[in-house]
Image (cartoon, rainbow, N blue to C red):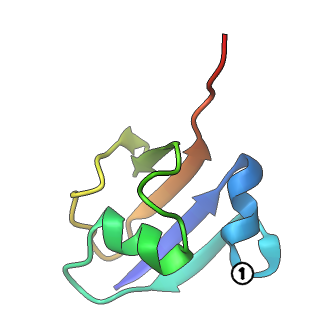
């Protein structure tokens, strides 16, 4: 399946060529955790995941043509 991936903030460094948006092919049935592993983003890194504009958990199964946006979670006080 083909996905559109957008990485924002300091997560851009995990993108090919360090761009903001790119397309990626993953096997059918892959979930967000599989995508994060493929990109080299561990589950322990604080981030917000959106799929087609809606927040999603790492166990969400992705579908062809999904648009996944990853952005760093803001922490501090």
Left of 66 or right of it: where is 19? right
Front position in the image: 76 or 29: 76
For image coordinates 43% across by 47% down, the residue present is 50
**Measured along the vertical axis of the image, is residue 60 above or below residue 50?**
below
Image coords of residue 7 (percent x, y): 64, 58
Left of 37 or right of it: where is 11? right
Left of 1 or right of it: where is 59? left
For image coordinates 53% across by 53% down, the residue present is 69
Mark 1 — residue? 16
Image coords of residue 41 (percent x, y): 53, 65
Image coords of residue 67 (percent x, y): 46, 61
Front position in the image: 15 or 5: 15
- Quarter holding the C terminus? top right
Count how many numbered circles sit on residues in the image. Answer: 1
Question: Mark 1: few, some, or many residues within 10 Å (few <14, many ≥20)?
Answer: few
Residue extending farthest front: 44
For image coordinates 21% across by 65% down, the residue present is 61
For image coordinates 34% across by 74% down, the residue present is 34
The quadrant where residue 55 appears:
top left
Give the secondary structure at mark 1: helix
**Measured along the vertical axis of the image, is residue 26 above or below residue 41?**
below
Image coords of residue 43 (percent x, y): 41, 57
- Quarter holding the N terminus? bottom left
The quadrant where residue 66 appears:
bottom left
């Amino acid at each position: 399946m083909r996905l559109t991936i957008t990485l924002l903030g300091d997560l851009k460094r995990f993108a090919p060529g360090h761009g903001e948006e790119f397309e990626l092919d993953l096997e059918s049935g892959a979930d967000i955790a599989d995508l994060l592993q493929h990109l080299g983003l561990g589950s322990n890194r604080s981030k917000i995941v959106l799929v087609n504009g809606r927040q999603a958990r790492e166990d969400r199964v992705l579908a062809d043509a999904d648009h996944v946006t990853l952005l760093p979670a803001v922490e501090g006080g």
